[in-house]
Amino acid sequence: MTPLSPDRLVDLYRLMLLNRFLEERLVNLYRQGKIVGGLYRSLGQEATSVGTASALEEGDLLSPLIRNLGSVLARGATPRDVFAQYLGRATSPSRGKEAHLGFCLPDRGIYAGTAMLSTMIPVMAGMLLADGILGKRTVGMTYVGDGATSVGAFHEGINFAAVRRLPLVVVVEFNGWAYSTPFERQCAARTLADKGPGYGIPAETVDGNDVLEVHAAARRAIERARGGGGPTLLECRTYRMKGHAEHDAQSYVPKEELAEWRARDPISRFERELEAGGHLDPGRRRAIHDEISRRLDADLAEAEAAPMPDPAEALRDVYAEGT
Amino acid sequence: MPTNVIMPQMGESIAEGTLTKWLKKPGESVKRDEPLFEISTDKVDAEIPAPVAGVLVQILVEEGKTVPINTVVAVLGEAGEPAGAGEPPPPAAPPKAPEEPPPARETIAPPPSPPPPSVSAPPQPGETVEELLRRRSSPVVRAIAEEHGIDISGIAGTGISGRVTKADILSAVGSGGPKAAPAPAPAPAVPPPPAAPAPLAVSSPAPVVIAPAPAAPIVTFSGSTVVVEPMSAMRRKIAERMVESKHTSAHVTSVFEIDFTNVARLRDRVKERFEAQYGTKLTYMPFIFRAAITALKARPLLNASISGDEIVYHREINLGIAVALDWGLIVPVIRRADDLSLVGLARAANDLANRARTKKLAPDEVAGGTFTITNHGGFGSLFATPVISQPQVGILGVGAIEKRPKVVTMSDGSDTIAVRTMAYVGVTFDHRLIDGAEGDTFMSIVKNTLENERWSELESL
Amino acid sequence: MADPRAKEGAALTLDPPGTGGGTLFIEAIRQALHEEMERDARVLVIGEDVGAYGGAFRATEGLLARFGERRVLDTPISEEAVIGGAIGAALRGLRPVAELQFMDFAARAFDLIVNFAAKYRYRTGLGVPMVVRGPCGAGVHGGPFHSQTPEAWFAHVPGLKVVFPATARDARGLLKSAIRDEDPVLFLEHKFLYRRVRDRIPEGDGAVPIGTAALRREGRDLTIVTYGAMLWTALEAAGELARDGIEAEVLDLRTLRPLDEEAILVSVKRTARCLILHEDTRTMGIGAEVAALVAEKAFGQLDAPVVRVAAPDTPVPFSPPLEEAFLPNTRTLIAAARKLAAW
C-alpha cells in the first residue's frame, strides 16, 4: 500500500479539525437556543470518521450515523449544508424536513439512514447489488456503533451482504457506550471483530484514535471489496468523550476513563506526528486553524441568513409530483 | 440593536432550566460564543455562550431562579445602548388568537338553523327514537321535504319505525304530497346560521343562563309581487339580538315628563361659546347623560346585570349611546362616563357618533356597556318602548324635546299656562331585577337633575 | 345460496357466461412480471425462493431462466434483506419487485417499509420506486399467521400506496402500474383468488391506473363498497338480493391508498345507502375510513346510517368451522344488506 503524501496527511488533519470545530459551533448554537432538538457530538472520535471515509474513491457510497460528521465532510459535504440542516432552514438539503445528518447528496454518494440503527446495512447491500447489476465497481461504507450490533438489521444485513459477497465495508465504531449502557452489558463477545467469522467475513480491530491506522485498514477493506472479496467488518476502537447527546451529562462514565482517553485525543496525537514528520509547524497550524474558523464563520453566517421553510413545505414530497 | 438572551432547551423533554451562575456582570462586555452564564437542568449542567458580541446590559433572571425554556434571561446591547426589548425569542407556544375582546363566557346559545316546517329542533324531551325517526327521518329525506315544501309527518313511511324513506318521499313528491303551510312553491329565504353576539365583559363566576330562543318558522314568499333580498350581517345580528333580549328580560317601561326649560335656556346661552372653546357641539345629550349617571350612582341596581341567581353590580358606568345609521343601528359605549365632565361627555358622544357614521369604531368601543341611552325623539317620536341591550337591565329613552303649553303654579298659588320645553323620558327596565318603585325612583332623580341642576361647570362660559 | 368460497376449483369471472378459457389470477401476475421485466431492464425480482423454485406460489416461475440471476435474486430468510435490498436497489435507479412469501411477514420488515421507504422522499427528496407484493387473506385453513389481510397497517402511512386487485385482469394491470410507480407500493394478492379467478386478458399493455375504483354492478338501492376476495361474495349476494327486488350497486375499490373518493361518493349519493364489506377485521379497518369519508362528504344524501360488514376483532382461527364463522360470507352480507335496504 502506497504511503500518503504530505498534502494528503495535512488534508486528514484539516478534516478532523473541521469536524471538531464545526461541532463546537453547533454546541454554541444549541446552548444559545438556536438549534432545537438534539445534538450528538463525535468528540474524540474524529479519526474514525475521517480516516475511514477518506479512503473511499469517487463514486463510492457512504451512509453515516449520527456521530459520523467527519465522514460526510471527508466526502465533500459542506459546513453550510450541515449548519442549514441543524438550523432547519429552507436551504438545507432536506428542506427543513429532517435534522442533523439526515440528508442525501447523491452526487457525492452520501445517503442518509433512518434513526433505526443498522438499517443501512441491508439497504446498502441492496444499493451495491444494484450497482453490480449496472456494471459498476462501487464500494459502500456504512457505520454502526457497538450498540447497533445488537439489533436484528445488523445481523440480517451483514448475513445478506456476506452471502452475496457484496463490496461493503461495515465500520463498527466501538466507543464503549450505547447511551448509558457499557459494552459489557451490550454484548457477550470479546470484541466486535469476533462476530466477523460468524458471518464468514474478515474482520479487523484497529486503534480508532490513530487516523493513519484507521485509514490504512479502511483502504485494505475497500480494496478487498472492490476486488470481489466481499464485506469486511472494521472495528475501530475509540471513546465517546461527551454524553450520548448534549443534554446527557454522562455522569455514569468513570472520570478516570475520560482522563485516560483524553490523553489519547486523536487530533493532538496526529498534530504531534505531523510536527515530528516536518509537515506542520506552529505557523502552519495557526494558518489552518484560522482558515477553518473563517470558513465556519462564513458558512454559518450564510446558513443563519437563509430563510426558514414555508409552512406549505410540510405537505410536499410525500409522493412523487402529481400523484 | 439589543439582543435577548434566552434559556435554551437542553434535551427534547426539558421544559425549564435553573440559572445557576452569571459569569459576567452588568456593564461587562462579552464576545460571541464566550461563556455568559451557567444552567442546570434535570439532565445536564452547562455553560451557555453569548449569542452575539456585546455588553451585558440587563440581567432579568437572578442566580438560583428556575424559568421555562425560551424565557429571556438577559439583554445584550452595544456599549451605551439603553435596555429595551430586543428581537423576540423564538416562539415556543402557538400564539393565542383572541376572538372578540375580551373573551368571556358565551352568554347566549345561538338558535339552531331554522329547519323546514314541522321538522323543528333536535330531540324533544321524552321523545323516543322511533318518534324522532318518524319526525326527522334522514338528511336526504329532510332535504327533499324542504325543497318541495312537504310535511314529512304527513306521509306514511315504510322504513323502520314507520320512518319516511327517500323512496317514500320521492313517490309523495311525484303525486303532490302533503304540503307545509303556508305557500307551496320553493325559493325560500333561508337565513344563514346567525353569528354569535359579542359577549359583555362580565367577570361572573357562573355563566349567564339564558333560555335559547325557540326557532322562528320560516315564512316563504315567491312570485312577481315580491322582491327578495338577503339581510345584511348587521341586520341579521340586530334581528337576532332584539328577539333574544325580549325573550330574556321582562320589559317594563315607565315614562316621566321632564321640563327641559332650564337646560334649554342655559344651552342657548352658552352653546356658541362652548363650541368655540371646546371644539364640539353642546346638545341636550350631555345633560341627559349626566342626569342618568347621577341617578345610576344613587340607584346602582339599574347599572347591574343578572347572572343566574346572582346580581352583578358593575363598578364602572359605561354608557351606551344608541346611534341611528343609514344602514342600521349601533351602540358605541362611553367608558367610565362618571369620570367625565360635561365637556368630556360632549366630546366623547360626538366623537363616537361621528365615527359610528363613518364606520371607524373599534370592536371594544361597542362592547362593555352597563346602561344605554337612546334618543328616539330625534326623529319626532314622543314615546317609545326600546329594547334592553343584554346583559344590561335598563335603557333610557328620550322623546322629542319640544315646546308645549304647561300649567305652571305661580308663587302666589295661582295657576297659569306657560310655554315650556318638555320631553317624555322613559326608562325601560328588566322587571326580573327592577321593580316599578325602583325604576320610578331612578327616573325621579333623572327628572330632578335635569330640572334643577345648576350645571356649575358651564358657569364660566 | 352457495358461498363462492365453497366452490373449490370453480372459476370466478366477470366474463360473460360461456366465454371459457381465460387466465388465472396467479398466471396474470406472473404474466405481468414477465412483461415488465421484458419491457424495462431495470425491473428485478427479489425474495425468498423466487429464483430456482419459482416462488412459493409460483408467481415468479420462469423468470430466472429467462432473465438470469442478476435480475432474479434469492435471499436468505430475512425480510429485512428482501425489503432492504429492494429499497437500496430502488435508490440506485432500479425497479425492484420484492416478494414476501406471506404478507403477514411484512411485519418483520415493518420498520424498513414504514420508516425507511415511506419517508425517504419526504426527508431527502429521493423516492423509493419499489413494489412489495405477496399473498394475503384467509379461507385456506392457514391459521393466524398465513391468513391476514394487512392493508390497514400500511394504508395509514403517508408515503405508501396500497393496491388490492380482485380480478385477474386487474392483477396484471395494477401490478404493471405499481412497478412503474415512482413511490413504494404494497401489492396485496388474495391467495384464495390465485386459482379461483380467471379473466380473458385482452391484447395490449392493459395497465390499470392506481387510485381508480371499478363499478362492477349498477344498482339503485344500496352501494356495497368492497375489494379483494370479498368482491366475489358481494356479487354473489347482489344476485340473490336482486331476486327479492333489492338492487345492490357493487363498487370494487381496487386501490386502498389513495382511495377513489369520487367513485365512492358518486355511487353513495345516488343510492343513499352505503355498506362497506371487507375481510379484514372490523375495528380501524379500511371500512372505518370509507365510512368517515361518506359521513363527512355525503351526509346530506344519506337515507340510512353507513354500515360495515367485516370479520370480528380476532386473529384468524384455524379449525374450519371457526374460520367460517370468522369470515364474512354471502349469508351474513345478504342479511346486512336487507336490513340496510329496509332502514
Image (spheres, coloured by chain):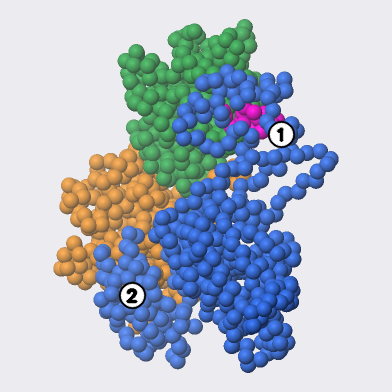
Q: Secondary structure at mark 2?
A: strand
Label 1 crowding class (10 Å Cα cut-off): few <14, some 14-19, many 20+? few
Q: Any idea which chain is the green one in this picture?
A: C
Q: Are marks 1 and 2 on the same chain?
A: yes
Chain ID of residue with mark 2: B
Q: Is residue B147 magenta?
A: yes
The hue of chain A in the figure is orange
Check the image and report above or below for B402 versus C114. below
Label 2 crowding class (10 Å Cα cut-off): few <14, some 14-19, many 20+? many
Q: Which residue is mark 1?
A: B182
- Residue at (46% x, 83% y) in the render: B84
Q: Examine the image and state in which quarter residue B156 appears.
A: top right
Drawn side of residue B1 relative to residue B187, left or right: left
Residue type at the position of mark 2: Ile
Q: Which residue is mark 2?
A: B48
Nearest the viewer among A89 and B247 is: B247
Check the image and report above or below for B320 versus A154. below
* Residue C180 percent coordinates (x, y): 57, 36
* Residue B455 percent coordinates (x, y): 60, 85
Q: Any idea which chain is the blue one in this picture?
A: B
Drawn side of residue C91 relative to residue B155, left or right: left
Residue A319 in view of the camera = yes
Q: Examine the image and state in which quarter residue A218 appears.
A: bottom left
- Residue at (69% x, 23% y) in the render: B177
Q: Examine the image and state in which quarter residue B461 appears.
A: bottom right
